[in-house]
Amino acid sequence: MHPAVKSLVGSTLGMAALQVTLGISTLLMYVPTSLGSAHQAGALTLLSLMILLTHTLRRPSPALLKSLASAVKST
């Protein structure tokens, strides 16, 4: 796996763990405004990381796969 993808996966998992912690803390402390806001910001960050990760790991186009297959055959 490419180092950038590993870093992105690690960041996403770390943010997910932080989001769970923020959510539990927010509920246990009866939803203080500061923790509620941090939880909302965490949700936005986690969503952004997931979109970026999905975009990074998308499947290659059929044209690219065909081009790669023909390049391998010609060598």
Image: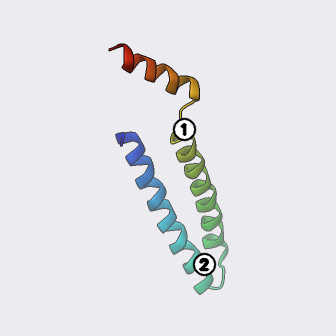
Tell me if residue 15 comes above or below residue 34 in the rendering.
above
Given residues 33 and 12, the one toward you in this image is: 12
Q: Amino acid at mark 1?
A: Arg
Q: Secondary structure at mark 2?
A: helix
Q: Secondary structure at mark 1?
A: loop
Name the residue located 58 percent from the left edge and 75 percent from the top edge.
Answer: 23
Q: Position of residue 7 (x, y in %)?
A: 39, 47
Name the residue located 55 percent from the left edge and 50 percent from the top edge.
Answer: 49
Q: Position of residue 5 (x, y in %)?
A: 42, 43
Q: Position of residue 22 (x, y in %)?
A: 55, 72
Q: Which labelled disc corresponds to residue 26?
A: 2
* Labels 1 and 2: the sequence-earlier one: 2
Q: Position of residue 75 (x, y in %)?
A: 32, 14
Labels 1 and 2 touching (C-beta < 8 A): no
State the quadrant of the N terminus. top left
Tell me if residue 33 comes above or below residue 13 in the rendering.
below
Name the residue located 49 percent from the left edge and 67 percent from the top edge.
Answer: 18
In the picture as drawn, the residue positioned furthest to the left comes out as 75
Given residues 47 and 59, the one toward you in this image is: 59
Q: Amino acid at mark 2?
A: Thr
Q: Which labelled disc corresponds to residue 59?
A: 1
- The mark lying in front, picked from 1 and 2, is 1
Tell me if residue 61 comes above or below residue 2 in the rendering.
above
**10 left or right, relative to 25:** left
In three-dimensional space, the C-alpha distance between marks 1 and 2, rounded to whole angstroms, equals 38 Å
